[in-house]
Amino acid sequence: MNNKKLLNKAKFVKGMFPQNIDFTPEEADKFIDYIIDQSVLKGNAQIVRMAKPTKIVRTIGTTGKVLWPDAIFDSTKYRKTVAAGKAELVSKKGRGCVVVHDDDLEDNIEGAAFVDHLMRMIAADIANDLEEAYYMGKKTPDGVLPLDINGLWDGWRHRMLTGTNTVTGSATILDARTTDFELYTNGYIAEQNASAPYNWEYKFGRMIKRMPSKYKKLAGGLSGLRFFCSDQIEQDYIDALAARSTILGDKALLGEGPLHYGKVPIIGMPLMDVDLPVLASGTIGDSTVAVDAVAGTKTLEVASGTNFVADDYVWIHKVGLEYKSEVHQIASVATNVLTLKTALLWNHAASDAELAQECVIDGTDAFLTHRDNLMIGIQRDIKMETQREAADESTYFFYSLRGDLLLGNPAAVVFTKNLKVK
């Protein structure tokens, strides 16, 4: 291809983007598919395509029998044991931008296929941000601007730890470093007794046992359930299987087939945090944050500083992981004043009854639930605008996306916190 044809082709590609790109429903569905394809949640969550900003999801929960002998059946039975409810997906807007430089176009000419490539590139970035926000998000209160996309809604983690269904109840919460588990409290996903008969404990097994039986009987049975965990916890489980020198261990090490515990698939989520705060042993647990803990400063006044020393980590939070939760490392301690190495993100007042607690940052999670219990709503109203910057020899692609999430039934979750990575 000669230079003239190359330049003409490059000019065509650069000029093929209108200022405003309106997605048809079919194109919006295709773009949503690209986002889903880039996420580890593909096939392990319920994707809801929202034609409007609000979509109602109907749910039915039971606390007892739903079938009775005719002779005793009356309203006292069904009004107490069966409740119909509804939950709503209400889309919230997120915005972003990518830059495509002319050199990229001229050196990597793809013709019409470039549009598809661009959509996939944008979708990959969106998928990463959404996946982190869907799990770790904590909605900021009305009137407080979110610091990032994680403040747009309450993520699944927050809902599992604090949410409840008025009919069916709350999630089963286990602590990997306590006697919630039968043999070991070291916090690892798989541990072996150093003495004969050298028994193994896999925390996945305990989680299955704690799942209420009625949720094990949903569509697909145990194979319809999923373990979700950090990819590093997944690797620790593989290493434990390999250490047994069995056929199962060899297959796990070689990656031959999907990874399971029994009949339940294990889904590794690379964006799941492995440095969450865990209360340290001997921690000070009742130190209330004082009124002069101001966002942007490094000074934190506490009720007592006697248990804190330099280089400790301090976790500032309300019970229940409220939105102001943050972790900082201590630079120095003077009586009841902590000087932090990094600036506070929020204002902390004594009236908020927050705690400043010594912690270590080596915690992560694993949870067990049905694949359809995690709901992701993405509205088809996807917008994109382009802006040409000749001085930069580039084109800016501004896009907006609306979405929301739901946890269908918190009671259908077994959540293990404070896991430790080897």
Image: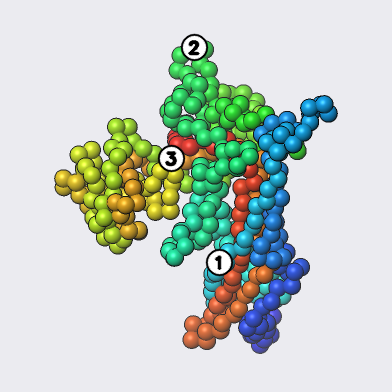
Q: Given contact means CB atoms under 8 Å apart, are the residues at marks 1 and 2 in contact?
A: no
Image: 379 above or below 232: below
**What amino acid does circle 1 point to?**
Gly
Q: Residue at x 43, y 30 (%)?
A: 177
Q: Which of marks 1 and 2 is nearer the N terminus?
A: 1
Q: Distance between the residues labelled 3 and 2?
A: 30 Å
Q: Does the residue at mark 3 contact the one at mark 1 (Cβ under 8 Å)? A: no
The amino acid pointed to by label 2 is Ala
| SS assignment at label 1 | strand
| Residue 315 pos. (x, y %) | 34, 46
Q: Which mark is residue 256?
A: none
Is 205 situated above or below 135? above
Residue 110 x/y as whole percent: 68, 73
As drawn, 312 above or below 140: above
Q: Which quadrant holds the N terminus?
A: bottom right
- Element type where label 3 sits in the image: strand
Q: In which quarter of the image is residue 114?
A: bottom right
Circle 3 sits on which residue?
363
Q: Of the residues tagged 3 and 2, which is closer to the observer?
A: 3
Between circles 1 and 2, the one closer to the viewer is 1
- How far, Cα to Cα, is label 3 from label 1? 29 Å
- Residue at the top extreme, as displayed: 196
Q: Name the residue under label 1.
A: 94
- Residue 358: image quadrant is top left
From the top left corner, tell me how far across and down residue 313 is, in percent.
Answer: 31, 44
- The residue to which callout 2 is attached is 196
Sequence order check: which comes first, mark 3 or mark 1? 1
Tell me the element at label 2: loop
Q: Which sits in the foreground, 244 or 314? A: 314
